[in-house]
Amino acid sequence: TVVTNMLLFNLMKLTLVKKQKEAGDAISFFWKTNTPLTWKPGQFLYYTLELPEPDPRGNVRHFTISSSPTEEFVQLTTKISQSGFKQALNRLEPGARVTGTGPRGDFVLPDPPSTELQVFLAGGIGITPFRSMINFATDNPPVGGPIHLIYSNSTPEEIVFKEELDAMAKQNTNLTISYTITKPEEIKTPWTGLTGRINGEMIKKLIANSQLLIATFWVCGPPAFVQGMQDELQKLQIAPERIEAEQFTGY
């Protein structure tokens, strides 16, 4: 199979350094590698785990590296579900070793960097590649042009990396962040930000007309979110070559 072939090269051992609870049911796992690893922001690794309980999808999954190449550890951030794989991952303690393969993926910013606006449309845990890209751009001020992140979650409590993202926005004058909440009726804390799903109207209010047709739109999240965003961008007459999409399926 394709996965088997991929696992034949770029094998590495990953040692878990620490785990960190993020917003909602998301957890970050920080790994160090036994050999130096270089990757482009937005790429992913394959992880092979020993599963005490069977999982119909097997013991290999791929996850975006949510850390930037400028950071010390390889970071995996995911929502924990009831699948055999996710449960085995969640039970790992610091010092545990797993097998990794990669990096892979072409959901990466252009090289050389574009000076035009990059619009990141993120749904839920689809923020992970954008965290890597934004962190990299913030750590390397000459890299790239303006970035506008539009990030959708059901409630403010679900916004993964909010404190980090807000800190980067203060540091990086090229970065704008707009959060939107789709279930305002479930909000437990005061919210003065945007509400509602990301749609063409919201995008037009946030992105100047002069930028709309020359910006590149990056979409990442669950399949329904990605499809919805592609439909909205099509209505806005955004050229297909200006849309980059990556969807996260549930496991």
Image (cartoon, rainbow, N blue to C red):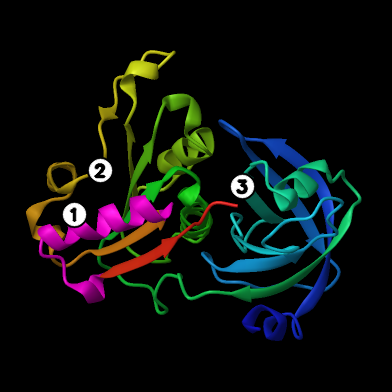
Left or right of 107? Residue 210 is: left
Q: Earlier in the sequence, mark 1 or mark 2?
A: 2
Q: Position of residue 131 (x, y in %)?
A: 50, 51
Q: Position of residue 49 (x, y in %)?
A: 81, 60
Tag 1 near tag 2, CB within 8 Å: yes
Residue behind mark 1: 232
234 relative to 190, above or below: below
> In the image, is residue 225 part of the stretch drawn in magenta?
yes
Residue at position x 79%, y 48% in the image: 88
Residue behind mark 3: 78
- Residue density around tag 1, few if under 14, some if 14–19, many if 20 or more, within 10 Å: some
Q: Nearer the viewer, residue 146 or 202?
A: 202
Q: At label 3, which amino acid type do we have? A: Thr
Left or right of 171? Residue 180 is: left
Using the image, tell me which numbered label, if any, was put on residue 198: 2
Describe the element under mark 2 as helix, strand or loop.
loop
Q: Taking the image as drawn, is residue 124 in sight?
A: yes
Q: Nearer the viewer, residue 225 or 107?
A: 225
Residue at position x 26%, y 38% in the image: 197
The quarter of the displayed image where residue 213 is located: bottom left
Q: CA distance from mark 3 to mark 1?
A: 26 Å
Range drawn in magenta: 221-242
